[in-house]
Image: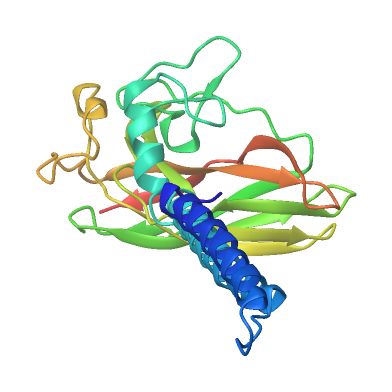
Amino acid sequence: MLSESDLRSLLRGDEEARDQNARSQNARSQPGAAPIDLGAVMRRSARRHHGQQIAVGTLGTLAVVGIGAAGITGIRSISGGSASVASSSSQSDSSTTEQGHAAPGQPAIKGKRASADRIHPCGGVLTPLTPDASGLVLSVDFPATASATASSITGQVTMTNTGTERLTGSTAASPAITLSQNGSVLWHSNGPTIMMAAMIDLAPGASMTYPAAFTPVRCTVENEQAESFPADLPPVGAGAYDLSAAIDFSRTDAAGDFVSTDLISGPLAPITLQ
């Protein structure tokens, strides 16, 4: 679109052309005067204004491209590095997460369920979990005995496809671990986690392992309200305990499309602290 100055230039060009035409007519009536090529004058005027239109149009295109690039960068920021911040914020403002799980510190809502690290709250009763219909099972592998005063005890968890179909999708980088005794929950995985995903592609009978760890301390219901447990929780002391694992599995179909988010768990594993 031409600006006001462009329109004024066009009008001036037309006036110049009319003046040139008048001078040409006068020149023809005067002997010995050189003739003026009116067509050439008009073409020069047209070229001058056409160049201005192209310049304006190019500037407009650059402006649109600039806005588009900024928009794409913004979208990438939202879906990339800022995704965890946005997700954390939405969980703070809502009682449910994007996948329909209960947010940290919130009870499960009818038709929803808590995420894997919130299914066994501190001080509660260890809830038996229904095996996943897909056939995925978690097995816990920690030392049979460990120090009751250790700051952290490490082991691993194995996910096995005991079903008859190939299973694909993703999970967190490590499962949630729960420490219990006689059916009472003493501690569970908590606190900020690295926003990383483990890609799952398991044929029937195949398995994969995750790193895992737990702290032999006792937490309370009040500790659930904080983002992570305090560092000075009391130790559970020597004795016989149980460990269990759970993880959220975002299942996809053969085309890579999201199907469902399933809670994968497995049997208890005994451990003795001394």
User: Of residues 18 and 46, which is closer to you in this image?
Assistant: 18
Residue that lies at the very extreme toward the left in this rendered image: 232
Q: Find residue 209 and report its horizontal and vertical position in percent.
A: 59, 64
Q: Find residue 68 and report its horizontal and vertical position in percent.
A: 52, 55
Q: Is residue 198 left or right of residue 122?
A: right
Q: Is residue 222 left or right of residue 76?
A: left
Q: What residue is rendered at 61% in x and 77% in y? A: 27
Q: What residue is rendered at 52% in x and 57% in y? A: 15
Residue 140 seen by the camera: yes
For residue 152, above or below residue 37: above
User: Of residues 156 and 171, which is closer to you in this image?
Assistant: 171
User: Of residues 101 and 14, which is closer to you in this image?
Assistant: 14
Q: Find residue 253 and report its horizontal and vertical position in percent.
A: 82, 47
Q: Find residue 41 and report its horizontal and vertical position in percent.
A: 62, 75
Residue 173 seen by the camera: no
The C terminus lies in quadrant: bottom left
Q: Is residue 132 left or right of residue 248?
A: right
- The answer to which quarter of the image holds residue 93 is top left
For residue 124, above or below residue 147: above
For residue 193, above or below residue 126: below
Q: Is residue 56 left or right of residue 146?
A: right
For residue 229, above or below residue 168: above
